Image (spheres, helix red, strand yellow):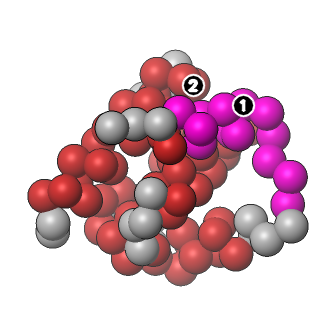
Amino acid sequence: MNKNVTELYNKALAVVLDEYGLTEERIFKSNEAECVSARRALIIGLINRGLTDSEIADCTHKLRRCAICKIRNKLVGKEEKWDVKMCIEHIKGML
């Protein structure tokens, strides 16, 4: 896997973990509302940074490419919750 992709994923994950106060394990294993929001923010933030569904799936080791594709496809015309929007903006602002 590309080192830059892994580095970007780790930085974005750190932002999401900090924003939501969750652990990586909990984000990917729980279906609680805050965990679902955290997953969406992470995936959408990474897609906005140019990562492909396959690259994100390879980084998470927990989500399959088709699950990431479903999240991406549900973006069209959907208004995000405020907390998800803010987290995505923080990911966009990462250096």
The residue singled out by tag 1 in the image is 83
Specify the segment rendered in magenta.
78-90
Q: Is residue 56 above or below residue 20?
A: below
Residue 67, quarter of picture: bottom right
> In the image, is 23 to the left or to the right of 19?
left
Work out which quarter of the rendered image holds the N terminus and state it. bottom left
The amino acid beneath tag 2 is: Tyr
Query: In what element is the residue under mark 1?
Result: helix
The foreground one among 84 and 24 is: 84
Quick check: 87 left or right of 57? Answer: right
Horizontal side of 72 relative to 56 (left or right) equals right
Q: Residue at x 50, y 63 (%)?
A: 47
Left or right of 18: which side holds 2? left
Label 2 sits on a secondary structure element that is: helix
Is residue 29 something one can see in this rendering? no
Magenta highlight: main SS: helix
Report the number of numbered marks.
Answer: 2
Q: Position of residue 65 (x, y in %)?
A: 46, 76
Check disc 2 and report the residue beneath it.
20
Q: CA distance from mark 2 to mark 1?
A: 9 Å
Which image quadrant for residue 19? top right
Residue 83: within the magenta? yes
The residue sitting at 54% across, 69% down in the picture is 68
Q: Is residue 30 magenta?
A: no
Q: How busy is the neighbourhood of tag 1: few (under 14 within 10 Å), some, or many (20 plus)?
A: some
Q: Nearer the viewer, residue 21 or 29?
A: 21
The amino acid type, in three-letter code, at marker 1 is Asp
Q: Residues within 10 Å of mark 2 (few under 14, many from 20)?
A: some
- CB-based contact (under 8 Å), mark 2 and mark 1: yes
